[in-house]
């Protein structure tokens, strides 16, 4: 197997340059990083992790602590996230450890045990809460971490996020411009920071259009097909209070909305307009829905590589001001909405 010195000689670069390229440091340009990674793969380079830990005091391993979904193999988000993070860290010569816990486990206690064991150098945090105790603990212990999203308070940590406020605002604005005033929002879990940002965007867009906020039309819960189905049927029970438009936090909820409206013999968009945020997961494909769904769009799979890069750079001592990235959100208007 090739060593760092072998790669250095082969590429005509210093050992330090090769090491920093493999670890994704921002002071090495992308072309050089790709060249070094390609050579490492061709020459069957394998890091000497024991030597690295002796030299640096680090294990060369980072982790993600997460409860497993009920059907992990059948959950496209879970599979994509784990495979994407594993691949992105491996490309940077870092091992990635998935630590599965029970829903009832105290997440801070789990992180404390892992930090005290010195098994991991840093952590990826997903599904951040508005007041996230995991982040508070890691910050106090001085342990590097990166967050997929932001918390409701301080943003003094590395993160990769999208503009979730803009998601809520843009989808609501599109509907108010079409004349809708009773607009329901099927959001995710109430304690998630991205859901709070989307709610604020929704409320601000309503206010900008002179539409009063009705708490009855804002629903929080799991972003799953079944929840979209049940909530839509409930919302449509009373003709006097039913919405003329529905926003959903993801496409699985939208799929449930479509099914419920069909069962109630309500047509999209003639009777009810529907919009959603699309993470571009394999199913459902929003352009192929009937009718094709109007969405804000941001590919979730584009999150994994930035998260790995940001954590590796944080481990290398990069300043937090360079470790905060907000990804793009596009708007795709299709034919699931109509003027009221």
Image (cartoon, grey):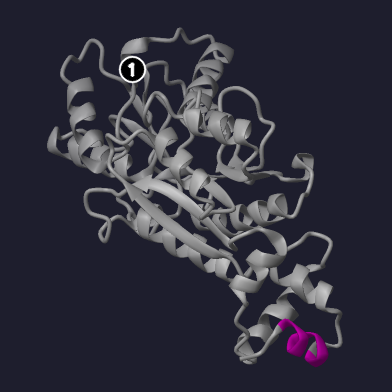
Residue depicted at x 25% and y 59%: 74
Q: Which residues are magenta?
A: 4-10
Whether 221 is drawn above or below 143: the answer is above
Magenta stretch containing residue 7, yes or no?
Answer: yes
Would residue 246 be found to the left or right of residue 162 on screen? left
Relative to residue 62, is residue 34 depicted above or below?
A: below
Residue at the spot 23% in from the left edge and 21% down from the top edge: 235
**Residue 120 magenta:** no
Q: Which of the 4 image quadrants contains residue 14?
A: bottom right
- Please provide percent x and percent y for residue 46: 60, 82
**Residue beneath the point at 49% across and 22% down:** 202
Q: Nearer the viewer, residue 110 or 249?
A: 110
Q: Nearer the viewer, residue 14 or 170?
A: 14
Left or right of 28? Residue 68 is: left
Q: Identify the residue under disc 1.
A: 217
Task: Please indicate, yes or no, whether residue 211 appears anywhere in the rendered image.
Answer: yes
Q: Quadrant of the C terminus?
A: top left
* Residue 285 in view of the camera: no
The count of marks equals 1
Pick the front one: 48 or 14: 48
Regarding mark 1 in the picture, which secondary structure is present there?
A: helix
Q: Residues within 10 Å of mark 1 (few under 14, many from 20)?
A: some
């Amino acid at each position: 197997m090739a060593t760092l010195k072998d790669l250095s000689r082969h590429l005509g670069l210093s050992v330090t340059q090769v090491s920093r390229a493999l670890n994704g440091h921002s002071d090495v340009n992308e072309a050089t990083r790709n060249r070094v990674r390609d050579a490492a793969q061709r020459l069957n380079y394998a890091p000497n992790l024991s030597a690295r830990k002796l030299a640096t005091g680090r294990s060369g391993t980072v982790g993600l602590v997460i409860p497993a979904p009920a059907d992990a193999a059948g959950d496209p988000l879970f599979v994509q996230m784990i495979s994407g993070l594993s691949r992105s860290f491996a490309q940077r010569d870092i091992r990635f450890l998935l630590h599965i816990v029970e829903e009832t486990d105290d997440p801070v206690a789990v992180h404390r045990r892992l930090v005290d064991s010195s098994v991991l150098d840093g952590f990826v945090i997903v599904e951040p809460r508005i007041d996230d105790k995991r982040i508070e603990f890691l910050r106090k212990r001085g342990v590097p971490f990166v967050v997929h999203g932001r918390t409701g308070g301080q943003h003094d940590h590395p993160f990769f996020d999208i503009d979730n406020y803009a998601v809520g605002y843009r989808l609501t604005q599109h509907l108010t411009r079409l004349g809708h005033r009773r607009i329901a929002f099927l959001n995710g879990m109430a304690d998630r920071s991205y859901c709070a940002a989307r709610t604020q965007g929704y409320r601000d867009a309503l206010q900008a259009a002179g539409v009063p906020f009705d708490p009855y039309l804002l629903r929080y819960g799991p972003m799953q097909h079944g929840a979209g189905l049940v909530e839509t049927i409930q919302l449509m029970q009373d003709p006097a209070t039913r919405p003329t438009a529905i926003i959903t936090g993801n496409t699985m909820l939208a799929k449930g909305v479509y099914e419920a409206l069909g069962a109630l013999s309500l047509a999209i968009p003639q009777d009810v307009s529907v919009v959603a945020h699309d993470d571009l997961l394999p199913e459902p494909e929003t352009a192929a829905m009937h009718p094709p769904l109007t969405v804000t769009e941001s590919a979730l799979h584009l999150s994994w590589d930035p998260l790995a890069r940001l954590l590796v750079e944080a481990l290398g001592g990069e300043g937090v001001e360079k470790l905060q990235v907000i990804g793009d959100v596009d708007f795709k208007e299709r034919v699931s909405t109509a003027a009221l």
